[in-house]
Image (cartoon, grey):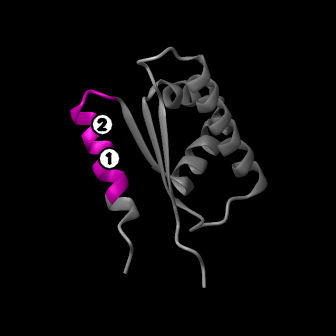
Amino acid sequence: MGTGKTHLAIATGSRACELGRTVKFYTVAELVMRLAEAKRSGTLERLMSEVQRCQLLILDEWGYIPVDKDGSQLLLLVGASVLLGIVGLGAGRDRFVASVPGSARK
């Protein structure tokens, strides 16, 4: 039985939507697959732009599926991009990054 991390992430995202914020929700595996496909098809810049425009990025299921080196680098690219967005924004236009770590493996 889980501890409710995904439920809390979804509730947070839903509330942000109710408040008029733009929200993206991905599992880490889903985002890595989308990033890898975008890189292969030459649309990585477009996907990165889409992710950067959201005001709340929720990444769920950290640690459930191992991520290879290329996937890790793409995730780092997203993280660096979002962090640069935070630094570049003025007061009142905060961008939030929520991550919901996966449970520890036994």
Question: Which residue sits at x=56%, y=56%?
Answer: 29
**Mark 2 closeness class: few <14, some 14–19, many ≥20 residues within 10 Å:** some
Residue 106 in picture, x, y percent from top left: 60, 85
Pointers 1 and 2 in contact (C-beta within 8 Å): yes
Tag of residue 16? 2
The residue sitting at the left extreme is: 18
86 lies left or right of 16: right
What amino acid is found at the position of numbered circle 1 in the picture?
Answer: Thr
Of residue 27 and residue 93, the one placed in the foreground of this image is 93
The residue sitting at the bottom extreme is: 106
- The secondary structure type at the circle numbered 1 is helix
In the rendered image, residue 17 lying in the magenta stretch gets the answer: yes
The residue sitting at the right extreme is: 69
Task: Give the magenta part as a residue range.
Answer: 8-21
Residue 93 in picture, x, y percent from top left: 43, 19
Question: Which residue sits at x=60%, y=79%?
Answer: 105
Of residue 92 and residue 12, the one placed in the foreground of this image is 92
Q: Is residue 67 above or below residue 41?
A: below
In the rendered image, residue 57 lying in the magenta stretch gets the answer: no
- The secondary structure type at the circle numbered 2 is helix
Q: Is residue 103 visible?
A: yes
Tag of residue 12? 1
Residue 97 in picture, x, y percent from top left: 50, 40
**Mark 1 closeness class: few <14, some 14–19, many ≥20 residues within 10 Å:** some
What amino acid is found at the position of numbered circle 2 in the picture?
Answer: Ala
Question: Which residue sits at x=74%, y=45%?
Answer: 73
